[in-house]
Image: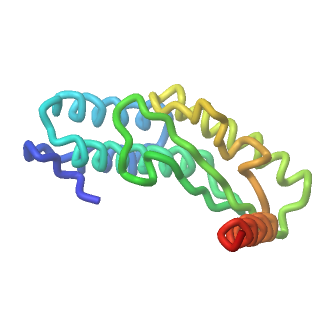
Amino acid sequence: MSLVLPSGRDLAESVAVLDAATDEDELRAGIEQAAAIVTREARTHAPALAAAWSTVLRHGVTAGLRLAGPADWTWFVSGSSARGEAVPGSDVETMVVLGDGVDDDGKAALLTRAAQVHAALERCGIPGDANGVLAGRARFCRRLRSWTEGIDRWAAELRRIAVS
């Protein structure tokens, strides 16, 4: 998605700050810088503004994860941020896929780390989903096999409903 707003303002510098963040203060500064630019775009065409802000949010989550350090997990952003429909004040919904080799103690530790990532994002102005779709909750933090089995069940249920 483009980071150039309809007015010609470019969020690339703000995203570069997020991508280079080495601590929470720099992460917050990047989010605040982007928020100030997007907020000034009050007359901007809404879809372009939402797409740009969604990109900022996704880069913010990525920076938060990078600051948390490596782990055997893959995060996904869903909801309005993933669809390119977020606006300043929108929350982020996240899910995480853990490697199948992660044991129960490892999963518990990663759930704690995921909650810490979301806490840091909150402090930087990126609120987590108010309905609880967060990587730090067990329902949204699963091993690959568990996600695959769940998706297969959901798809089978949809096929059953469609045939009925």
Give the position of the C terminus as an image quadrant.
Answer: bottom right
* The quadrant where residue 118 appears: top right
* 41 to the left or right of 123: left
Between residue 44 and residue 114, name the one nearer to us. 44
Q: Tell me where residue 95 appears, x and y as whole percent.
A: 64, 52
Question: Is residue 85 depicted above or below 89 in this figure?
Answer: below
Question: Is residue 75 depicted above or below 123 in this figure?
Answer: below
Question: Is residue 107 depicted above or below 114 in this figure?
Answer: below
Between residue 151 and residue 147, name the one nearer to us. 151
Residue name at image x 84 percent, y 69 percent: 101
Question: Is residue 8 depicted above or below 2 in this figure?
Answer: above
Q: Tell me where residue 149 appears, x and y as whole percent.
A: 80, 70
Residue lying at the far front in this picture: please name it.
164
Give the position of the N terminus as an image quadrant.
Answer: bottom left
Residue name at image x 59 percent, y 30 percent: 130
Q: Tell me where residue 136 appears, x and y as whole percent.
A: 71, 42
Residue name at image x 90 percent, y 60 percent: 103
* 85 to the left or right of 110: left
Q: Tell me where residue 29 appears, x and y as whole percent.
A: 36, 31
Residue name at image x 64 percent, y 42 percent: 133
